[in-house]
Image (cartoon, rainbow, N blue to C red):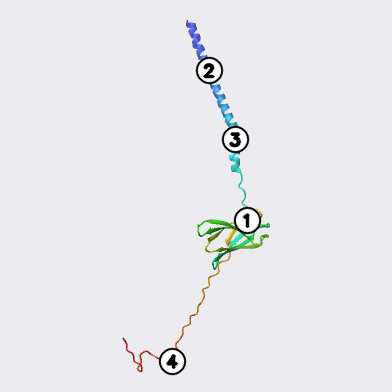
Amino acid sequence: MTDSLREQLYVEPKSSLGLKLVAALSAIVVTIAVLVGYAYLRRRHAASAGSPASTAQRSPEPRKPPQALILVDDALLQGKETLVGGTVKNTSAERLGQVAVELDLKRRKDGMTEKKLIAVEPSQLEPGQEGRYSLELKSQDYGSARLVGLRVGPDSTSVVYTSGSGQKRPPERLESKTIVIDRPSKGKRSEFLNSPDKPARVP
């Protein structure tokens, strides 16, 4: 009995240690498998959707230089009409065709805005060449006009531009009126209402 008990005491610790080693190795294998699978899925997602790191490293696209300079003249009042206009200068090295200025017109009756394209004359502008645009509006229909864009080509492609102030409104001239006062004649100037020859009663 004593020998068998001793054998059992020595055998049981050996078997429990082996189980612990097997469990530890299994846990390590499972952890490695999970990490490998996660890394694979992450790499696959980055390849399909694009890596955020590569997107952040992309340099921003260079901003296009302005191709035209638009000078906006002060609006002129001509009776019941308002004249809106200005100048467009081609500041690029290329020819601009079918040039048109885009304005936002604000209506008086409802306060809404409507867009209007005004053709530039001449419609073809060579590098450094200038053109004029103008539009007559009824003062009772529209309250203001604002420059919002410049379009070129048959497809009315929007191009980059810079703007500035053009011709100023001429000062208003006040009509001078001459007032003529009739002067009394010399004969009537010496006459008085109350004189020794013609005494008058003072109330």
Label 4 secondary element = helix
User: Relative to the observer, which residue lies in front, 106 or 37?
Assistant: 106
- Quarter of the image for residue 79 reads bottom right
Label 2 secondary element = helix
The residue that appears at 60% across and 31% down in the rendered structure is: 40
The image shows residue 91 at horizontal and vertical percentages of: 64, 59
User: Relative to the observer, which residue lies in front, 120 or 192?
Assistant: 192
The residue that appears at 61% across and 34% down in the rendered structure is: 44
Q: Nearer the viewer, mark 2 or mark 3?
A: 3
Label 3 CA crowd tier, 10 Å (few <14, some 14–19, many 20+): few
Q: Amino acid at mark 2?
A: Leu
For residue 181, side relative to residue 22 (left or right): left
- Residue picked out by circle 1: 151
Give above or below for 44 relative to 75.
Answer: above
For marks 4 and 3, the one nearer the N-term is 3
- Quarter of the image for residue 31 reads top right
For marks 1 and 2, the one nearer the N-term is 2
- Residue picked out by circle 2: 19
Q: Does the residue at mark 1 contact the one at mark 4 (Cβ under 8 Å)? A: no
Label 3 secondary element = helix
Give the spatial CA distance, label 1 vs label 2.
Answer: 81 Å
Q: Nearer the viewer, mark 1 or mark 2?
A: 1
